[in-house]
Amino acid sequence: MTIDTPLIPHFPYPLMLIVIIAFAGLDAITTHLILSMGGYEYNPVMSPFNQNPWLLVLIKIGYIFIIYMMAVWIERRINKGGWVLVIITSVVTSFGIINNIIVLLQHG
């Protein structure tokens, strides 16, 4: 069994899925903490949805699903190409996470 051997047949490349979930989850958790402290969402795409936490969860699940399916599709055509997408989205998401952590440390 290799690291990309599917644990569940319909979820190839499980590590990709874990990485995407981890970054999306950290972003959601840190954003929720800031909003619960009276902070603001400065992302104009996400700000309308932050009033309803369940809607935000659905959006994050949709995001995870889309990125994962795109990464699997690319990986099956270009060796390690799916990982490029996962790394790029993780780096972009990490900017938000780092900003959220800085805000939490300053105002926590």
Image (spheres, rainbow, N blue to C red):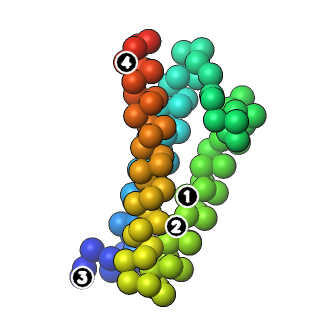
Q: Position of residue 102 (x, y in %)?
A: 39, 24
Alpha-carbon span between mark 2 and mark 1? 6 Å
Whether tag 2 and tag 1 are in contact, CB under 8 A, the answer is yes
Residue type marked 4 = Leu
Whether tag 2 and tag 3 are in contact, CB under 8 A, the answer is no
Pointer 2: residues within 10 angstroms few (<14), some, or many (20+)? many
Q: Earlier in the sequence, mark 3 or mark 4?
A: 3
Residue type marked 1 = Ile
Q: Residue at x 50, y 25 (%)?
A: 33
Residue under numbered circle 4 = 105
Q: Quadrant of residue 84?
A: bottom left
Residue 64 circle label = 1
Residue 53 visible (yes or no) = no
Pointer 1: residues within 10 angstroms few (<14), some, or many (20+)? many
Tag nearer the camera, 2 or 3? 2
Tag nearer the camera, 4 or 1? 4
Whether tag 2 and tag 4 are in contact, CB under 8 A, the answer is no
**Dot 4: what SS?**
helix
Alpha-carbon span between mark 3 and mark 1? 25 Å
Residue 93 visible (yes or no) = yes
Residue under numbered circle 2 = 68
Q: Earlier in the sequence, mark 4 or mark 1?
A: 1
Q: Earlier in the sequence, mark 3 or mark 1?
A: 3
Q: Residue at x 44, y 63 (%)?
A: 86
Alpha-carbon span between mark 4 and mark 1? 27 Å
Q: Position of residue 13 (x, y in %)?
A: 40, 74
Alpha-carbon span between mark 2 and mark 4? 31 Å
